[in-house]
Amino acid sequence: MTRLLSLGVALACAGPLLAQTPAPEKTIPWGQYSSEILTRYRDLVELDTTAGHEIRAVDYLRKVLEGEGIPTKTLALEPNRPNLVARLKGNGSKRPLLILAHTDVVGVQREKWPVDPFAAVMRDGYIWGRGSKDDKPVLTANLITMLMLKRRAVALDRDVIFLAESGEEADTTGVGINFMVGQHFDEIEAEFAMTEGGGATIVGQRVSIVNIGTAEKLPARARLVATGTSGHGSVPRLDNALIHLSTAVEKVGQWETPMHFNDTTRAYFEKLTTIASPEKAAHYKELFNPTSAGAAQEYLRKYDPSRYSMLRTSVVPTMLKAGVGANVIPSEAEATLDIRAFPGEDIEKFYAEMAKVIADPEVRIVPIPPSRPPSPASRLDTEMYRVMDRVAKEIYPGAVVLPSMSTGASDQAQLRAKGIQSYGVGPASTEEDAINYPAHGDVERLAESSLYPFVQYVWDVVTGVAARR
Ligand SMILES: [Zn+2]
């Protein structure tokens, strides 16, 4: 009896006691860290890390990480374009988590900028600068996460690996993810990865949609090459290569390629029907109805082209090359097609279908070797996705969380191709800001108020997946 009674007392105490000592990852007074977050972020945005200068970011990151006792490794194919890896060890009961971000930024046309693009100028509540969206928020969030894990000595069930990679934007020589996957995969091998490729949309004063990137299309570009008889411009010929080429370009440009769904896009469009305007929601619903899907696609093609692209392998003519003079019929003319394959598309079969659409023996399809491997979509039934979904709803109350497929390509392709379940994140912005000040745009900026919740989001996901349970 006494024993039971004392046990009862002990149990009664356990609740409040546990509540008073939550895990170290749960008690961060984030407000006290805003100035550190902002400083580190601005430090990184101030570095001009256009292709060939990634070493500037690596030097900075190495100093900061090593300064706090986190060992780093620098792995480089080209001395000025190194990658940096840091690993915090877990107890090994689960496989590692890789958090990565690229250090390079695309170039700038200085005359288009109202401010110095490498000064991280703060104006009107925004931080302005190249890389302010792509990809220095993720780089900063990953860095802060590593520092906090170390400072608070968070016990880990899995290793957390930090990777700052070069050459994401322009990797003609394979210095970044290709080098890491090809030569140093043991340094980054993981069960899960998190990096750029997602985002969140602010409507009014709050975040209403959070996108978790789970899939992407595969660039599978091709050239159309038409041949004919060359000759004098004064003599019309039926086998003029330009005529054949332009007819072929028109046919593939108009071609409605077959519609597909995968788990990600099905979940995406289903959830979209619950939050879109009634007019748009009706169109999204029709996509699932075989008798009205055609009309719905026509609507998307006209008014919602990025979502139209999410439903198929897309074919977009982007370049034409022909001719040397106004009075010369060239014997060859060519067009470049930016083809973005739906994950899992059998591209050889697709080219064969395209040849049938063109139906002209004078026009050949010449595939351009792909720069990335085909990659399957990441799963939605993993611990990582569940944690991301939960954390997104905690950080952005009331937001709808959507798995999403990028129509572009990213370094996640190489990771997914190696079997890593990889997920994309990104800070929130309004739709107007995403249009007017986008990644790669003439001018790029991020709202300061989007930075802090994003860092917290990354932290909560990393600790949710990796901290000891
Ligand atoms: Zn990027």
Image: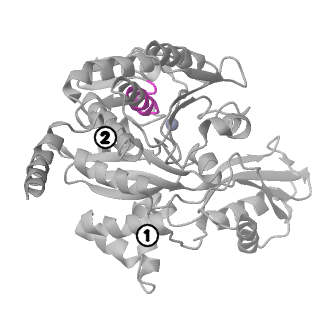
The amino acid marked with disc number 1 is: Arg
User: What residue sits 59% from the left and 34% below the top?
Assistant: 169
Task: Identify the element where label 2 is drawn.
Answer: strand
As drawn, 224 above or below 68 = below
Range of the magenta residues?
A: 130-144
Q: Is residue 49 visible?
A: no
Residue holding disc 2: 429
Residue 270 lies within the magenta run:
no
Q: For the residue carrying disc 1, how many other residues have a C-alpha within 10 Å: few (<14), some (14-19), or many (20+)?
A: some
The amino acid marked with disc number 2 is: Ser
Q: Is residue 188 visible?
A: yes
Query: Which of these two is toward me, 176 or 368?
Result: 176
Query: Which of these two is toward me, 227 or 81?
Result: 81
Residue holding disc 1: 266
User: What residue sits 41% from the left and 58% below the top?
Assistant: 403
Residue 142 lies within the magenta run:
yes
Q: Nearer the viewer, mark 1 or mark 2?
A: 1
